[in-house]
């Protein structure tokens, strides 16, 4: 592998236009203190002292892209419920052009995390899948919006909001737009033709199997890239950093984190940073180095968080 290079120059991102499409969710956090074990079962009792709500999933990708200075549009589906209204309220002042299609039969996805100092004790998910008619309307709007974007991000959390992802990739590529996909599940054939996929280590292993060494990883990753007709495969590897697999070889960056507090949402930061940098004219290799730096910053924060330009340039 090629040696890592110094962090590239961070460009002016104010003209970058990023369209984010995918599964949005509401991330709820209950924070409290743990001082005893329940007499009913061997579990800790958390005395909740405060709570927070943050936009998650594709909404967190959009927030990260906006924090990096880009002009961002977000296209997704929410339910006609309290959580959907909370997402609209939270995203209102963000500066993101949000189009949240309302499905009256959908329960907006909520991920509730219970934090007992200093660690996450429990996550509870509430979710259902959107209906076909609402998704079809979203696909039509996607086609109308594609011309006003430089880069498209498809954020697949496996919640059903990207049922038409194969068509979206085709539409975007026909329009000459790079498409970055954060994948989910073990059927990557639906992502064929995208510019780049950004699986993490465990997600890739689910698709290509367990590798024995770096040479075996190279072989499996490149075979997947070629099979899916991708320009690149970016694998985030936790404490091992990240590796970019392209037709002209591999580029590896070691982990940049000074302190790891919470890895939730780190993948959102990586794909958002890649999108903004590519939309700003940065090469794919340099964009990957900057994204690795951004990931090293965001894992030092609690929960779904963002990294801004000042932090990147510090």
Image (cartoon, rainbow, N blue to C red):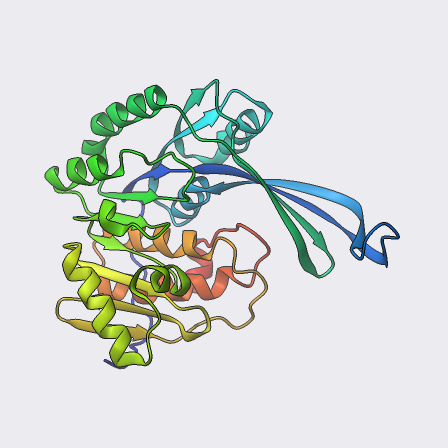
For residue 110, what is the image quadrant?
top right
Q: Is residue 294 positioned above or below 105 on the image?
A: below
The x, y position of residue 305, in whole percent, is 52, 51
Identify the residue shown where x is 26% and y is 29%: 142
Q: In this view, does 36 lie to the left or right of 203?
A: right
The x, y position of residue 59, in whole percent, is 44, 39
* Residue 70 in view of the camera: yes
For residue 101, what is the image quadrant?
top left
Q: In this view, does 184 lie to the left or right of 87?
A: left
Residue nearest the observer in this picture, 45 or 254: 45
How many numbered circles does the render carry? 0
* Residue 283 in view of the camera: no
Residue nearest the observer in this picture, 79 or 40: 40
Identify the residue shown where x is 33% and y is 26%: 135
The x, y position of residue 307, in whole percent, is 46, 55
Q: Is residue 145 positioned above or below 158 on the image?
A: above
Identify the residue shown where x is 51% and y is 27%: 88
Quarter of the picture containing the N terminus is: bottom left
Quarter of the picture containing the C terminus is: bottom left
The x, y position of residue 33, in whole percent, is 80, 54
């Amino acid at each position: 592998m090629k040696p890592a290079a110094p962090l590239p120059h961070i460009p002016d991102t104010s003209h970058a236009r990023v369209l984010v499409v995918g599964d949005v969710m509401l991330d709820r956090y209950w924070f409290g203190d743990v001082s005893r074990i329940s007499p009913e079962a061997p579990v800790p009792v958390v005395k909740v002292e405060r709570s927070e709500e943050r936009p998650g999933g594709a909404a967190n990708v959009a927030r990260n892209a906006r924090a990096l200075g880009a002009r961002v549009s977000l296209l997704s589906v929410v339910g006609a419920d309290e959580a959907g209204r909370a997402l609209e309220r939270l995203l209102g002042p963000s500066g993101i052009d949000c189009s949240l299609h309302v499905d009256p039969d959908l329960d907006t996805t909520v991920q509730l995390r219970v934090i007992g100092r200093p660690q996450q004790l429990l996550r509870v998910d509430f979710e259902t899948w959107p209906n076909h008619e609402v998704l079809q309307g979203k696909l039509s709007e996607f086609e109308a919006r594609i011309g006003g974007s430089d880069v498209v991000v498809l954020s697949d959390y496996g919640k059903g909001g990207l049922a038409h992802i194969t068509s979206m990739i085709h539409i975007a590529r026909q329009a000459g737009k790079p498409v970055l996909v954060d994948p989910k599940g073990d059927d990557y054939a639906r992502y064929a033709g995208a510019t780049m996929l950004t699986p993490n280590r465990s997600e890739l292993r689910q698709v290509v199997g367990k590798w024995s060494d770096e040479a075996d990883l190279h072989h499996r990753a490149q075979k997947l890239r070629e099979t899916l007709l991708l320009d690149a495969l970016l694998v985030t590897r936790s404490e091992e950093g990240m590796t970019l697999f392209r037709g002209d070889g591999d580029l590896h960056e070691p982990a940049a984190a000074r302190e790891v507090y919470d890895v939730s949402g780190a993948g959102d930061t990586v794909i958002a940073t890649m999108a903004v940098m590519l939309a700003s004219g940065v090469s794919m290799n340099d964009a990957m180095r900057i994204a690795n730096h951004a990931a090293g910053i965001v894992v030092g924060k609690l929960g779904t968080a963002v990294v801004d330009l000042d932090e990147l340039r510090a």
